[in-house]
Image (cartoon, grey):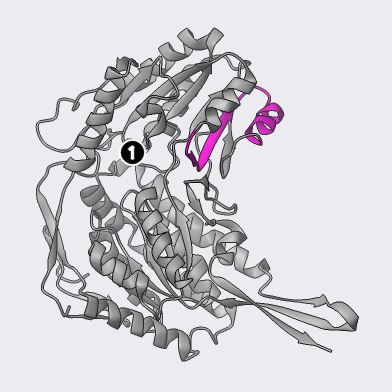
Amino acid sequence: MQDQQDQQDHHKLFIDGAWTAPQGTERLEVFSPATEERIGSVPLASSADADRAVAAARRAFDDGGWTGLDVKERAAAVGRLADAVTARADAFVDVLTAEVGLPRATLPAGQIAKTQGVFAAYAELAERYPWAETRDGSRGRSLRVHRRPVGVVVAIVPWNAPLFISALKLAPALIAGATVVLKPSEEAPLHAQLLAECVRDAGLPPGVLNILPASAEVSEHLIRHPAVDKVSFTGSTAVGRRIGELCGHDLRRCTLELGGKSAALLLDDLEPTADTAKALIMGAMANSGQICAAQARILVPRRRHRQMVEALAEAVEALRVGDPEDTATQIGPVISERQRDRVERLVSLGRSQGARLVHGGTRAGHDRGWYVEPTLFDEVAPDMAIAREEIFGPVAAVLAYDDEDQAVSLANDSDYGLAGAVWSTDPDRAEQVAGRFRAGSVAVNSPSPLDPFGPFGGFKQSGLGREGGPEGFDAYIEYQTIVRP
C-alpha cells in the first residue's frame, strides 16, 4: 500500500487502474473517533478528476473488454477481488478500527466475514441467474429476453459498514458487466485506498473499478454526469431524497438504501431471559447503534413490561464501552463530534418529552473521543422524537402494547420501513406477525434481518430498490427483448 506509515497520508487517486496525481489540491484530513487524533489524509477529487474517472469507466464499458467477457469470467475476476480482500483482512481490521471506531474484536466475525459472505453469495447466484431466457410470444413468435449490464455506475457508500456495503454494490454490478466509480464516505476514506490495492491485486482491467474520495459538490457532479447510467446510494434519507431528485431530472436509474427506525416486537408468549435481552440490546446498539437496520424500538407486552425492562437494563449495564483497540470492547465511539452532539440532543429531547431514562444518557466518562454511553428509555410514547427519528447512536426505546394488533400498529407507525424482528416461542406465529410489518426485511427470533441471498431494502422513506439476492443483479441490468418470427 502506498506510503503506509503510522499516519496514513495518501497522495494519489485510483483511476483507470492506476494511482494518478489529482488535478485539484484539496485534501481531506481523517481523525480517530476514539482519540480525536489525526490518523491520515487523502486527496479529494476535483470535478476534473471525476470526469477522468467516469471517462475511464465509460471506456472500459464501451470497448467491450469487460462486458464482452462471459459472465463466468467476470465472476472469476470478482472472486479474485474477494480473495485479495481476504488476504488483506488484518489490514482492513486495522484501518476500520482506526477510522470508524469499530471494535477490533467484532470485525473478523462481523464486517470482514459479512463482506466475504457477500462475495461468496454472488459467485453462487451468478451461476443460476437467468442472464438470458427464451419465451413463447404471441402469434407463434419467439422471444429472447436478455439481461444486459446497465452501464457506468456511481456507487456511493456510507462510513458505518463501508467494506460490507461496498461489496453489496460491487459484486452484483461487476458480475453483471457494469463498470463502477466508487465514492467512499468523507468520514471513512482510508479503507478505500486499501480496497484499491485489492483491485490491483485482482488484476481487474483498467477503468472497471475506480475509487474516488470526493466532497458533496463533486459527488453531485458525478451524479449529474451525462456518461453515468446508474447511481447506487446507501445513506441518509435526506441525502437520498436529493439524489433521487437529481436522477429523476435526467431519468437516470437509481437505487436508494436509506434510513430506518426499526422495531423488535416481543410477542406475549415469550418469557424474558438474559439471552433474549442481550440479543435485543445488540440489535439496537451494535456498532454503537450506527446501523440502518438497528432495531431501536423495542415493543413489549404490557403484562411483561416490568420484567422485560429489568432484563434489558441489565443487558445495557453489562456492555463494555471503551477503546475500540481493546479486544474486550463491545461498544466504541460514534463516528464524529457532530454525530455525538446529535445523539445527545435527541437523548435530552427524550427526557424533556417525558420518557423515563433507565440507563445512560452521558458521555460514558471518556475525556477524549466521541463516546455516548449506551442509553435505554422506558415509558416512550410513539409520537416522541426518540421513537420517530433515526438516532444512529446507542439508544433504545421501550414501548408497551396491550394486544397483537396494537403491537403491529406500533411497529408500522413510522415514516420508515427498512427492517424489524419478531420474537416468539412459536416461529410460525412469529412469521405470520412478521408478514404484517410494512418493512423490507423482518427476522424471526434474531436481531439480524439481512442475508446476502435475500433482497434487502425498504418500504416508505427507507428507499427504492433492493440489494442482496438475485434482486441485487436486477439493480444493475437492463432488459432487452429480441423478437423473432
| Residue occupying the point 50% across, 34% down | 447
Report x, y in % for residue 441.
56, 43
**Circle 1 — which element?**
loop
For residue 311, say whether it is visible: yes
Say which quadrant the N terminus sits in. Answer: bottom left
Between 391 and 274, the residue placed more toward the observer is 391
Q: What kind of residue is marked 1?
A: Phe
Q: Residue at x 46, y 84 (%)?
A: 61
Residue 138 quadrant: bottom right
| Figure quadrant of residue 339 | top left
Please state the total of marks drawn on the protein image: 1
Q: Looking at the image, which residue is at 32% across and 81% down?
A: 17
Up-down: is 473 above or below 272?
Answer: below
Bounds of the magenta segment: 414-435
Q: Is residue 430 left or right of residue 42?
A: right
On the picture, is 216 further left or further right than 244?
left
What residue is pinned by disc 1? Answer: 392
Q: Position of residue 379 (x, y in %)?
A: 41, 14
Residue 318 shows up from this direction: no
Neighbor class of circle 1 (other Cα within 10 Å; few <14, some 14-19, many 20+) is many
Extreme residue toward the right, this view: 140
